[in-house]
Image (tube, rainbow, N blue to C red):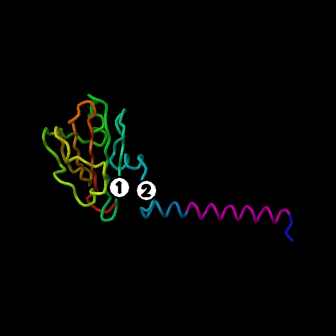
Amino acid sequence: MQTRTGKIISGILLFGAAITIIVTLLWGTNALGWRAWRLIEVENFIGAKLPDGARDVRFATDNQKTRIVWLRFTLPAQTDLSDFLNQPGLDTELCAGFTPFPGANPAEAGMTWWTPQTAQTYSGFYVIREGKMVELLLDQTDPANPIVYLRVYALGME
């Protein structure tokens, strides 16, 4: 039979062990890439916060060979993208009629929301910046609801 002090010490040790196990598991899933990314992590990876008014935000990420992020969002009409593009230092102009996404690749086939190939009126660019390939398409087919498609991937293992 334990004393009251012994029970308190045992409880504290058990609580400490449980916290240690939980923190270790969370750290491990994050460090090994098993945990799904949150939007804040996507923004950190691309180096920019989404523009004010961004809606219908969808993203996916993978790190089998390198870290890659697919991001899609809709904007209010006439939204200026320059602040969004300037945050990560993308001073590249959008080229009318240019798409960095001429065809879907196998990794994108399962993403029903990733449809840049359906754009009829669009502009885009691609640029290499700080060890990452950045590809962007602005779909202006519906001027009231322009859609941004952004794919960013590290050129080496992240």
The C terminus, quarter of image? bottom left
Residue drawn at (36%, 32%) of the image: 53
Q: For mark 1, what is the residue?
A: 61
Residue drawn at (18%, 49%) of the image: 100
Residue 69 or 113: which is nearer the viewer?
Answer: 113
Sequence order check, earlier mark of 1 and 2: 2
Q: For mark 2, what is the residue?
A: 36
> How many residues crowd mark 2 within 10 Å: few (<14), some (14–19), many (20+)?
few
| Amino acid on which disc 2 is placed | Ala
| Amino acid on which disc 1 is placed | Thr
Residue 17: within the magenta?
A: yes
Residue 29 or 13: which is nearer the viewer?
Answer: 29
How many numbered marks have been drawn onto this rendered protein structure?
A: 2
Q: Is residue 56 above or below residue 14?
A: above
How far is mark 1 from mark 2, CA to CA? 8 Å
SS assignment at label 2: loop
Residue 121 or 71: which is nearer the viewer?
Answer: 121
Residue drawn at (31%, 63%) of the image: 157
Q: What stretch is highlighted in magenta?
A: 4-23
Asked where in the image residue 10 lies, by quadrant, the reply is bottom right
Q: In this view, does 6 lie to the left or right of 57?
A: right
Residue 114: within the magenta?
A: no
Estimate the x, y position of residue 85 in percent, counting from the top left.
27, 39
SS assignment at label 1: strand
Q: Does the CB distance between marks 1 and 2 fall below 8 Å? A: yes
